[in-house]
Amino acid sequence: MSLASLLRFPDFSRRPALAFISRRSGPFDGEVTLDKHRVYILPTKIGVLFSLLLIILLLGSVNYGKSLGYVLVFLLAGVGNVAMLATWRNLAGLRLRAGGCAPAFCGEPVRFAVQLQNVDAMRRYSIAISQNGTEFEVVDVGPDSVAQIHFSKTSAQRGLLDAGRFRLSTEFPTGLFVAWTWIELKMQCVVYPKPATRARLPVGSSVIDGDQNRLSGGLEEYSGLRKFLEGDSWRRVSWKATARSDELYTKEFAGGAPELQWIDWSTIAAGSAEQRLAIMTRLVLDAEAARRHYGLRLPDYEIPPQHGTLHCQQCLKALALYGY
Amino acid sequence: MGTSRHSFSQDRLTAKLGPVLLGIHIVALPLYPHMPLPVLLTVVLFSIWTLLIILGRVVQPGRLTMVLLACIVVAVLVLSFGTIFGQQPGSAMLLLLSFLKLFEMKSTRDIAIVIFMGFFLIASNFFYSQSLMIAIYVFVVVVYLTSVLIVFSDRLGTTRFIVRVQHSLQMILLAVPLMLILFVLFPRVPGPLWGLPKDTQTAATGLSEAMSPGSISRLVSSGEVAFRVKFVGKPPPRSERYWRGLVLSKYDGKTWRSDNAPSDTYPRLSRSEGADTSYDYTVMLEPHHRRWLFALESIVEYGDEQNLTRELQLLSTDPITDVTRYSLRSDTTVRNLGLFESERGKNLDLPAARNRQTVEFARALFGDSNQDGSTYVKKVLQHFGEQAFFYTLTPPLLGINAMDDFLFRTRRGFCEHYASAFVYLMRAVSIPARVVVGYQGGAMHPFDDYMIVRQSDAHAWAEVWLEGQGWVRIDPTAAVSPTRIQNGIASAGLERDLLPSILVSENAWFQRARLLWDSFHNNWNLWVIGFDQQRQQRLLALLGMKDVSSSELVIGLVLVMTCAVGLLAWWVLLSEPARQRDVVRAYYDKFCRKLQKAGVSYHPHECAGELMARASRVLPARERELAMITADYQCLRYGDDPDPRRRERFIRAIRRFRPS
């Protein structure tokens, strides 16, 4: 059993004797204190080398009968012991809480934050976080203060992503020992569907509500032309300008109420639900980028037309969690 | 395993090389005086190179350059020592290799290896000295090297130098009790496990194999301790403190040498009747890198590790490279009677056709003494005492007829002049005689129970073989300067500026401090340097454990160590960690815990008011109490008037608070 394999989270199906580790590692809701049951410690390769050095020095001292050699070896052995305790102490007693996350699109890394609270009067140095053997960040936690440490995880599926079990470790102060813990906090993050690269709004999906009259009544002033963007209303296409060049142009109006648009599940023609969601995601993003008012209609859920970052996130979340 | 190996980017790593380079020099500092010039020059070159790498002027050498450098290191070692094996070339190689390791530094692990090489280097100092000063130095070095280890485990580089030293010091102070336990209880295995290295001749002050004018007077200016003696019972009177070292019987006209011929015969001893004049004592001899040992005359009992020659010289089987302890019994009245034919010839031999005047003077005086040895000896001593002979540390130089010059012209000399002139005068009339060098004197420590014999007590005297009496000690210096023998070298009227300050200083505080230091040093020698199986057993006996076997010792060691580490772990890990003492906060936390038990969980993002609102909904009966506690908390924590009565009320309310 190599050192490296010990530091990985063990495969409990193959090593039932180590199942206690699994029970102790969570998932925890709220705060968890890294007490003595959850912090493990082993010498690093440098630590093993150090003990080899001590053995050689001890043999030399015995052979040459050098008392100060004994003193040096025993002092260093003592330092090794204290270093073990100090490394353990650097991690143990830390309090962890879920620290939130930033939602991301499917295929992009999701950044989870973990709050590390140090209630002791001593500083904790060089605490690293890793998951599946990849290290993400190293932080110090000052005395009686809170620090945030982050790790990222990529999901291949939309929906809710569990943060999963991560590993906090430290080799401070000597690098002779590594103390670590495996912890899972109840922490989930929304993963939005991966947006389709391009999407065309199906004919008739864009409905101008009651404001239609105002529009036709010419209460708004024509303000200019711009290139057609996916999701633009067909009613506003300037056919004259389109005929002159081979591209579509949209007429823009100022002063009046913004254009309204429904992004409707039932009007999207796609092979599967996931494809449909991908197209709808794209439409939401485009509508938000075009600063239009848009609403979302899913078979079991409806979000009235609105605009802004919050609204966009709400729509994306609804798309992400569709079917959950 | 991404976390256990940190590959630093190259420039960050080289920036951290500074403390390591400094570390190598600190470690090697006590070794530098023992290193030959080529090695020192290489060290200087390598240091400059490392500095250039740190400053970014030079890139780290490639593989081919490294091979070349390794060849250069071997060449330098062979040039300096003729070999790369052995103890001195070994430490030189370790020193140079640690620089090579610095050059090819790639990861934290390389740094750790250099630091570990540093621990080896510091241990190789013990071949040269194990003094208290070296021990203190090693302690400092260990603190420093450990602080360098901290640099490399501090991944963010946030620790300042002083903080690292604090951390390191803290760890090492906690390690000291563990070290003491291991030191006392670890079973001592006597003798080497494999071959001992050949001793490296180092310049240690002390007597040499030969005596020529100036060789002893040179020593007198040294206040260094030659050896310390602990007597069982009373020490002998000052005039009997003749510590025999070497017997010199070969003379070439200038220099006296010892007769290295092997002797398979044993001394014939006789004890005169009378009072008990034997002394039991233990000598703690400072290393002088020779084999001879010092003893009072005449040795009657000695240990297994020592040999006694027929000249009653005590020799150790190996050169004395460490503080060595040996116990003897001597009897001042015992005389060596043996004089073998081969010995007689050697002890009469004189260089031919020299010092005619001296030989004539001797024959005339011998005739005046009726050819009687004892009378003749008395007359010669009388001559030294009555004529204008002077005892001085700065005698004039002597010519080819050294004895004629000394006895009839200069008449100024130190003990080696008087001893050699006396022996010459004896041999000139066929009385077997020889020179003995050693120490005369030694002072009892004023507030400790041992005697200090210093290099300044170095002395030379004579032994003559008289029919019926055997070998008799004659000290001609006593005839010239009786106070030298009676009161010691400091009161012999010598040039004070040539004597060591410890002997002539008028400053009482200085004297006291020096003696206190010596007492400390003696205990260091006894309990640390000289801590062997025998001492270990004695210490355990003091603690009430007699005849402890090695296996019992190991079991005891494991038990005690387990307890000690457990205790340390408990203290470091499980005792309540140092918290900031904030009583208000502590009680409010208690309040929150009580609420939690009642089903109102505490959210850290919530302010006190929000918690109270939620708690009131769950526990409507306690609303008044909750409101009061919360209001007091807000006042005490955020208000600018810390009212002690309010605080009392707040604490009392929380103590009494029973939500259910």
Image (cartoon, coloured by chain):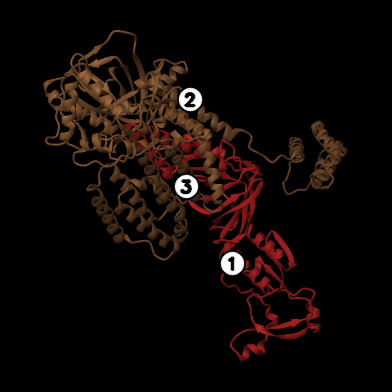
Chain colours: A red, B brown
Q: Residue at x 39, y 60 (%)?
A: B48
Is B284 located above or below residue B622 in the figure?
above
Q: Is residue B25 left or right of residue A95?
A: left
Q: Position of residue A45 (x, y in %)?
A: 41, 44
For the question of whether residue A165 can be seen, the reply is no
Q: Residue at x 64, y 53 (%)?
A: A100
Q: Quadrant of residue B182?
A: top left
Q: CA distance from mark 3 to mark 2?
A: 46 Å
Q: Is residue B519 left or right of residue B550?
A: right
Q: Nearer the viewer, mark 3 or mark 2?
A: 2
Which chain's residue wears label 3?
A: B
| The C terminus of chain B sits in image quarter | top right
Residue wearing tag 1:
A195
SS under mark 3? helix
Q: Quadrant of residue B189?
A: top left
Discs 3 and 2 lie in a common subunit: yes
Please state which amino acid type lies under the numbered disc 2.
Pro
Residue wearing tag 3:
B149
Closer to the camera in the image, B65 or A223: B65
Q: Residues within 10 Å of mark 3 (few under 14, many from 20)?
A: many
Please state which amino acid type lies under the numbered disc 3.
Leu
Residue wearing tag 2:
B446
